[in-house]
Amino acid sequence: MRNKILRSDETKIELFGLNAKRHIWKKPGTHGEGSIMLWGCFSVAGTGRLVRIEGKMNGAKYREILDENLLQSAHDLEQRFTFQQDNDPKLTAKTTQQWLRDKSLNVLEWPSLSPDLNPIEHHWRDLKIALQRQRILSTPC
């Protein structure tokens, strides 16, 4: 069964270091936030889509991300899967649960108040380390 699990999660990536507060110059009317939010998924067959989350993440935005990316990622990786997500309230909302049922998706039961043991956390960590190294290497001395 472990080989058929499609795991998903979202993460925040700080663009200027870990929770760093930096003053930056930006053109008027442009966004100069110091972080981005990403959603991604993976299985033993490989990685699925990586999506930048625009705006505030809420239940409607999450269902939109799933609708546009989860099923396509699953199709690209493997035909049949069990879906894993954590117990964030926007992920477990009644409307999200109904969306999952409407799509006839099998969802891995995840105990509430459990530590985040989703292996995707290791991928997020690797991505953040790689980005940090890239910033260090590309910073002029």
Image: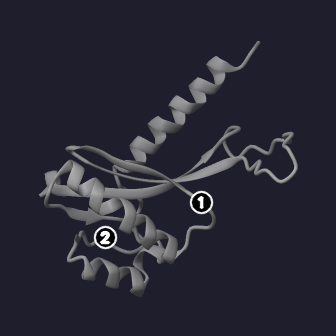
Q: In the image, residue 129 lies at what x, y percent?
A: 52, 32
Quickly name the residue at label 2. 110
What is the quadrant of residue 80 in the picture? bottom left
101 or 4: nearer the viewer: 101
Q: Is residue 87 above or below residue 52?
A: below
Determine whether the residue tagged by mark 2 lies in a helix, strand or loop: loop
Determine whether the residue tagged by mark 1 lies in a helix, strand or loop: loop
Disc ID at residue 54: 1
Q: Amino acid at mark 2?
A: Trp
Q: In the image, residue 125 lies at what x, y percent?
A: 47, 40
120 or 115: nearer the viewer: 120
Disc ID at residue 43: none
Identify the mark nearer the N-term, 2 or 1: 1
Tell me the quarter of the image containing the C terminus: top right
Q: Amino acid at mark 1?
A: Glu
Q: Is residue 91 above or below residue 82?
A: below
Is residue 10 found left or right of 28 in the rendered image? left
What is the quadrant of residue 126 in the picture? top left
Q: In the image, residue 110 lies at what x, y percent?
A: 31, 70
Is residue 54 found left or right of 96 in the rendered image? right
Q: Which of the two marks, 2 or 1, is nearer to us in this view? A: 1
Is residue 79 found left or right of 36 in the rendered image? left
* Residue for point 29% across, 54% down: 73
